[in-house]
Image (cartoon, rainbow, N blue to C red):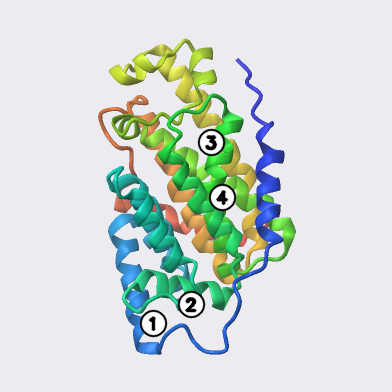
Amino acid sequence: MTIQTRTWEGAVLALADEGRRTMATAVLPHPVADEITLQTAYAHCEAITAEHSRSFHLASSLLPAEKQRAVRALYAFCRISDDIVDCQTDNNVATRMQEWQANAFSNRPPANDLAALAWADTRQRFHIPIRYAEQLVEGVSRDLHQTRYETFAELATYCYSVASTVGLMSMYITGFSGPEAVPYAVKLGLALQLTNILRDVGEDWQRGRLYLPKEELALFGLAESDIAAGVVDNRWRQFMRFQIARNRQLYAEAWPGIQLLNEDGRFSIAAAAGLYRAILEDIEAYDYDVFNRRAHVSTWGKLRRLPDLWLKSRRPS
C-alpha cells in the first residue's frame, strides 16, 4: 500500500522560512540579570531537563558548557509551555499561558521566573529568531482545541510547530552553515515528534487525543474504537510498520544536515537523533503494543550506541 506523504513539505518549509526571516532577539546593552542570578536560572533549567528527558539531558551533555546550558534553557522553555497545556485545568490554562508568554518573550523577565530569565539570556546570546518560539507556543496551544488529525499533511504542520521549531532554535545555539541547513532541521524535528506520537498512542488516548492520521487508520481498516480497545492485530501491525518506515525515512533524510552544523555540536544532535530513533526498535520488539507499556531505550542501550553515533557524526554523509 502506497500513501502520498510529500504534500506536507511545502507548507512546513514555508513556516520555517517565515520564522527565519523575522528579526532575532535584540541584544540589550546590559545583561538580563547579574551572573549569580543567571547561574541559578540555568541550574534550574538543567534540573528541569534532567527530570523530564533523560535522553535530551544525555545528548545535551555532549555540547560545550555554554551551548549545553543554552539548549537546556531552550528545553525548559518548551517543557513549561507544553506542561501548561497538559497539566492545567480548563479554567486557568489561558491565564497561565498568557502570564508565561509575557515572561518568556520579555527581554527582561521578572527575577523570580528563573526559566524565563535563562531563556531570555539564551535568546540574546545566540540571536534566536523570536518567531520560532512563537510558533512553538502556537503549536502546543493547538492541543487545547484540536484533538484529531485527518491527514498526515495536517499532522506535519503540528509536528513542525512543536518539534521542528525546537530544532531550528537549537541550530542557532550549535551553529550552522546557512539556510541550506533548515530543511534538514525541519525533517529531524518531524522525525522526533513522530516517534513521540507512535510511542505515546495509549497515553495520548487517555488524554482524549489521537495524533495518528484518521485517513491512514481507515486505509488499514482501523477505527478509533480499535485505539480505545488497545487492539494489536495484523491490521495494527501493518499500520505501525508503515508508520515506522516513514519515520525512519525522515531520520535518514535529516541525517546529512548534521554535517552542516558547527563541529562541536554534531555529536550531540547525532546522539539525540540516534537515541530517539532507537525507540522504534523497542516498539517493534514488543509487537507494536504501545497501549500497555511505554517504549524506551535503557541507559545501557543509550550508552552502547554512543560510540557508533560519534563515528557517524564525524563522517560526511
SS label for mark 3: helix
Q: Nearer the viewer, mark 4 or mark 3?
A: 4
Mark earlier in primary sequence (3, 2): 2
Q: Is residue 237 left or right of residue 298?
A: right
Q: Nearer the viewer, mark 2 or mark 4?
A: 2
Measuring from the top left, give residue 238's x and y in whole percent.
47, 18
Q: Amino acid at mark 1?
A: Leu
Marks 1/2 in contact by CB < 8 Å: the verdict is yes
- Can residue 57 be seen in the rendering of this structure? yes
Measuring from the top left, give residue 94's x and y in whole percent.
38, 50
State the separation of the CA atoms marked 3 and 1: 38 Å
Q: Nearer the viewer, mark 3 or mark 2?
A: 2
State the separation of the CA atoms marked 4 and 3: 14 Å
Q: Quadrant of residue 236?
A: top left
Mark 2 lies on residue: 121
State the separation of the CA atoms marked 2 and 4: 22 Å
Q: Quadrant of residue 143?
A: top left
Mark 3 lies on residue: 247
Q: Amino acid at mark 3?
A: Asn
State the separation of the CA atoms marked 4 and 1: 27 Å
SS label for mark 4: helix
Q: Is residue 157 above or below residue 93?
A: above
Mark 4 lies on residue: 164
Measuring from the top left, give residue 52's x and y in whole percent.
31, 55
As drawn, the label of residue 38 is 1
Point 65% across, 55% down: residue:
257
As drawn, the label of residue 92 is none
